[in-house]
Image (cartoon, grey):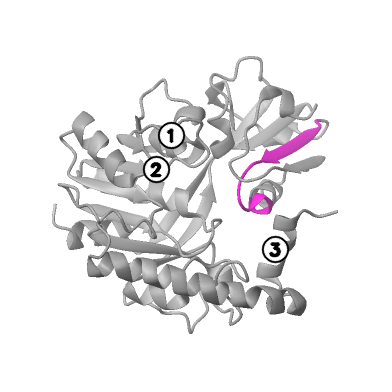
């Protein structure tokens, strides 16, 4: 039997008339609450905090699964290439601690959350996590006073932190849909009209519908795969020609696991089994299936401290390519 969240998520993609009848009133209530909360911050009725350096928020109006993390990594790397001293802040979803944490080389996914740890390792940018992004930002600046700009990973709806620029990531598959709705009847946290107020929209994972242009500043991103590497020896790359007699299993604890599985198949890899875990799921060595080879995502790879005893585990890296140059747009429109 499918679980409730699976039924709801399936409904978001292919609306069920009966569920729509039940959930539509709740979505209308959610819309009113979300609008009032934003208006309270915008009007000053609720307090928001400004950090001493510019803040660029990269978020979405969907409830996850938009391909945002690779876009944040690409933006931060692009800013670094332009000489900008940039840091990252995030909520750190899924971590065990509630305390503000400034990441270091010994940080674990339990300390920081899987996505912030992945961003930290990919970009080497100073990174901090905290349920209050403002507190995380203050801690990050205290540890790294040289920073000129902070990128907030997610937090488009975290209005307690003032921002100098808002970038919304929107999945290409939804750009032509006319049946999108707010939670819980749909997957949106805010209405589509919210996109008109952000500074830029990045369409992720494909080509946007021709009629979809909610912002004057539109960008597109797609994912490219790198070479699969061994978890405990990243310098060792996988030879795809030697897999004919191997039992290969793919494991993913991400929002859209089929994207990962399809990427492997598109590389010519025959998968004997696929294991889709919940997004941000804890994964330990004991949870991995018995196979000659297990391929995981980089987001899941950070959950294994050193890969000890996991010689059969390999990792597929992915990179976002954003066109036109999003980092150039940010550096030209934010006063650093």
Q: Earlier in the sequence, mark 1 or mark 3?
A: 3
Residue 240 placement: quadrant? top right
Q: Which mark is residue 8?
A: 3
Dot 1 corresponds to which residue? Answer: 98
**Span of residues in magenta:** 246-259
Q: Which is in the foreground here, disc 1 or disc 3?
A: 1
Residue 106 on image: x %, y %: 41, 20
Dot 2 corresponds to which residue? Answer: 131
Most extreme residue toward the front, as rendered? 45
At a point 30% along the width and 49% down the height, the residue shown is 151
Mark 2 and mark 1 in contact (Cβ < 8 Å)? yes
Mark 3 and mark 2 in contact (Cβ < 8 Å)? no
Residue 253 on image: x %, y %: 64, 42
Residue 330 on image: x %, y %: 25, 58
At a point 64% along the width and 36% down the height, the residue shown is 296
Of residues 112 and 229, the one drawn nearer to the viewer in this rendering: 112
At label 3, counting other C-alpha atoms closer than 10 Å, the crowd grade (few under 14, some 14-19, many 20 or more) is: many
Query: Would you say residue 29 sits in the magenta stretch?
Result: no
**From this viewpoint, is residue 199 visible?**
no
Figure check: 179 above or below 145: below
Q: What element does badge 3 sit on?
A: helix
Q: Earlier in the sequence, mark 1 or mark 2?
A: 1
Most extreme residue toward the top, as rendered? 309
Q: CA distance from mark 2 to mark 3?
A: 27 Å
Of residues 297 and 169, the one drawn nearer to the viewer in this rendering: 169
Q: CA distance from mark 1 to mark 2?
A: 7 Å
Q: CA distance from mark 1 to mark 3?
A: 29 Å
Mark 3 and mark 1 in contact (Cβ < 8 Å)? no
At a point 18% along the width and 59% down the height, the residue shown is 334
Query: Would you say residue 252 sits in the magenta stretch?
Result: yes
Q: What element does badge 2 sit on?
A: loop
């Amino acid at each position: 039997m499918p679980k409730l969240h699976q039924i709801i998520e399936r409904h978001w993609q292919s609306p069920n008339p009966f569920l729509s009848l039940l959930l539509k009133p709740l979505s209308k209530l959610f819309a009113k609450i979300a609008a009032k909360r934003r208006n309270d911050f915008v009007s000053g009725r609720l307090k928001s905090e400004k950090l001493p350096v510019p803040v660029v928020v990269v978020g979405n109006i969907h409830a996850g699964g938009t391909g945002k993390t690779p876009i944040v990594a690409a933006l931060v790397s692009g800013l670094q290439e332009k000489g900008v001293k940039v840091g990252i802040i995030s909520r750190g979803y899924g971590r065990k601690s509630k305390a503000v944490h400034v990441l270091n080389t010994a940080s674990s996914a339990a300390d920081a959350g899987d996505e912030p740890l992945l961003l930290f390792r990919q970009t080497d940018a100073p990174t901090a996590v905290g349920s209050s992004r403002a507190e995380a930002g203050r801690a990050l600046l205290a540890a790294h006073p040289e920073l000129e700009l902070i990128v907030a990973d997610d937090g488009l709806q975290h209005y307690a932190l003032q921002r100098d620029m808002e970038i919304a990531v929107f999945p290409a598959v939804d750009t032509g849909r006319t049946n999108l709705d707010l939670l819980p009847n749909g997957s949106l946290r805010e209405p589509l009209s919210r996109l008109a107020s952000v500074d830029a929209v990045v369409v992720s994972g494909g080509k946007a519908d021709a009629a979809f242009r909610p912002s004057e500043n539109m960008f597109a991103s797609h994912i490219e795969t790198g070479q699969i590497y061994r978890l405990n020896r990243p310098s060792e790359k996988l030879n795809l020609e030697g897999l004919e007699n191997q039992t290969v299993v793919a494991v993913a604890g991400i929002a859209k696991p089929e994207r990962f599985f399809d990427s492997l198949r598109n590389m010519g890899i025959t998968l004997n089994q696929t294991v889709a875990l919940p997004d941000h799921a804890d994964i330990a060595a004991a949870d991995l299936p018995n196979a000659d080879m297990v391929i995981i995502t980089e987001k899941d790879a950070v959950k294994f401290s050193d890969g000890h005893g996991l010689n059969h585990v390999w990792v597929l890296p992915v990179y976002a390519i954003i066109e036109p140059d999003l980092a150039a747009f940010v550096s030209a429109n934010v006063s650093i």
